[in-house]
């Protein structure tokens, strides 16, 4: 049985398909009966070079096109013309019907955007949605900050009122408590005895206290140095984690695409998370993987 099918030619990652007539029992790249044209689906407009008369000839001979070739023939009006021929229409009627079909097709093509236009429209829509999300997050953060500031202000006012009340109570208590002369004299005697006792302390005890003070200062200095080293290490770890944890959802789509194009593939692991819903960013990563 004769088949009209595509035969792959060209080079790696840049194929060009030949539209050929071949025996169904032959392999895909095997011997052919006739070459009808070329089909290049890599270009944006899907360029086609086809011998229409020979294609109709082989269809009349009973050759069956594959699904892909049938779609190409249908898009070119060949299947419609073959249908009119089978109905027994005259050449004038066929030409008139094909002219009307071509006019309707041209009107439809004018309304359909190109692939590049669809890609640009998708990118603009994603950018608009991303900006909207950023604005929403900023507004929520500002509201939360204002709420925290209001709560902090209320706490400060309450603490201030409590402190004022405490001070007033202390002043009233001090005014009511006036020590008697005897109590003052006894307190003076006690203070005199304590001073004398302190003067009689041996010099060794004073030296021991100075040594303990020096030891405490050394320990305090060592602890402060350790805390500074720990803070410096924590700051460095935080900066490294921020640099390593950067993901595409924190960037604009254009910035994320440029980062994917300018970064080696082995360093892009985890850059595009699962919640990344922008198609352009996902396509950029897929293209990067295919070209690597």
Image (spheres, grey):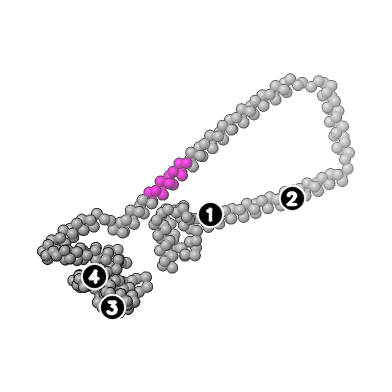
Of the two numbered discs 1 and 4 in the rendering, the one whose residue sits closer to the viewer:
4
Badge 3, how many Cα within 10 Å: few under 14, some, many 20+? some
Q: Is 133 inside the magenta-drawn segment?
A: yes
Q: Do the residues labelled 1 and 4 touch (CB within 8 Å)?
A: no
Q: Is residue 132 left or right of residue 86?
A: right
Who's the residue at 74% across and 20% down the image? 176
- Residue 244 at what x, y percent from top left? 53, 57
Image coords of residue 231 (percent x, y) = 62, 51
Q: How far apart are marks 1 and 2 (CA)?
A: 35 Å
Residue 71 drawn at (x, y percent):
27, 64
Q: Mark 1 points at which residue?
A: 242
- Callout 2: helix, strand or loop? helix
Determine which residue is flagged by label 4.
Answer: 49
User: Which one is in front in this view, the residue at disc 1 or the one at disc 3?
Assistant: 3
Which callout, 4 or 3, points to the residue nearer the camera?
3
* Marks 4,3: beta carbons within 8 A: no
Q: Please identify, in this view, whether the residue under mark 2 or under mark 3 is nearer the observer.
A: 3
Badge 2: how crowded within 10 Å, few (<14), some, or many (20+)?
few
- What number of labels is visible? 4
Report the span colored magenta: 127-140
Cα distance in 3D space between marks 4 and 3:
18 Å
Query: Mark 1, mark 2: which one is toward the viewer?
Result: 1
For the point 40% across and 46% down, which residue is it?
Answer: 132
At a point 24% along the width and 66% down the height, the residue shown is 73
How dense is the environment of label 1, judged by Cα within 10 Å: few (below 14), some, or many (20 and up)? few
- Residue 87 magenta: no
- Label of residue 219 in the image: 2
Query: Splitting the image into 4 quarters, where does residue 165 fall?
Result: top right
Residues at badges 2 and 4 in contact (C-beta under 8 Å)?
no
């Amino acid at each position: 049985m004769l088949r009209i099918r595509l035969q792959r030619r060209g080079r790696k990652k840049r194929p060009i398909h030949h539209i050929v007539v071949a025996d169904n029992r032959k392999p895909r790249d095997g011997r052919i009966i006739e070459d009808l044209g070329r089909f290049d689906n890599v270009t944006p407009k899907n360029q086609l070079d086809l011998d229409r008369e020979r294609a109709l000839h082989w269809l009349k001979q009973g050759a069956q096109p594959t699904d892909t070739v049938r779609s190409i023939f249908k898009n070119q009006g060949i299947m419609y013309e073959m249908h009119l021929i089978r109905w027994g229409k005259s050449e004038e009627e066929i030409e008139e019907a094909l002219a009307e079909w071509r006019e309707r097709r041209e009107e439809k093509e004018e309304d359909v955007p190109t692939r590049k236009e669809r890609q640009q429209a998708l990118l603009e829509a994603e950018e608009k949605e991303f900006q909207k999300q950023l604005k929403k997050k900023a507004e929520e953060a500002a509201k939360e900050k204002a709420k925290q500031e209001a709560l902090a202000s209320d706490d400060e006012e309450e603490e201030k009122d409590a402190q004022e009340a405490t001070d007033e109570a202390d002043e009233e208590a001090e005014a009511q408590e006036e020590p008697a002369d005897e109590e003052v004299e006894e307190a003076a005697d006690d203070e005199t005895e304590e001073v004398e006792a302190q003067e009689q302390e041996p010099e060794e005890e004073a030296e021991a206290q100075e040594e303990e003070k020096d030891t405490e200062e050394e320990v305090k200095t060592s602890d402060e140095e350790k805390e500074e080293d720990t803070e410096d290490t924590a700051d460095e770890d935080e900066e490294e984690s921020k640099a390593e944890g950067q993901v595409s959802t924190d960037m604009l789509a254009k910035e994320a695409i440029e980062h994917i194009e300018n970064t080696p593939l082995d360093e892009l692991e985890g850059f595009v998370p699962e919640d990344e819903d922008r198609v352009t960013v996902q396509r950029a990563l897929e293209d990067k993987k295919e070209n690597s």
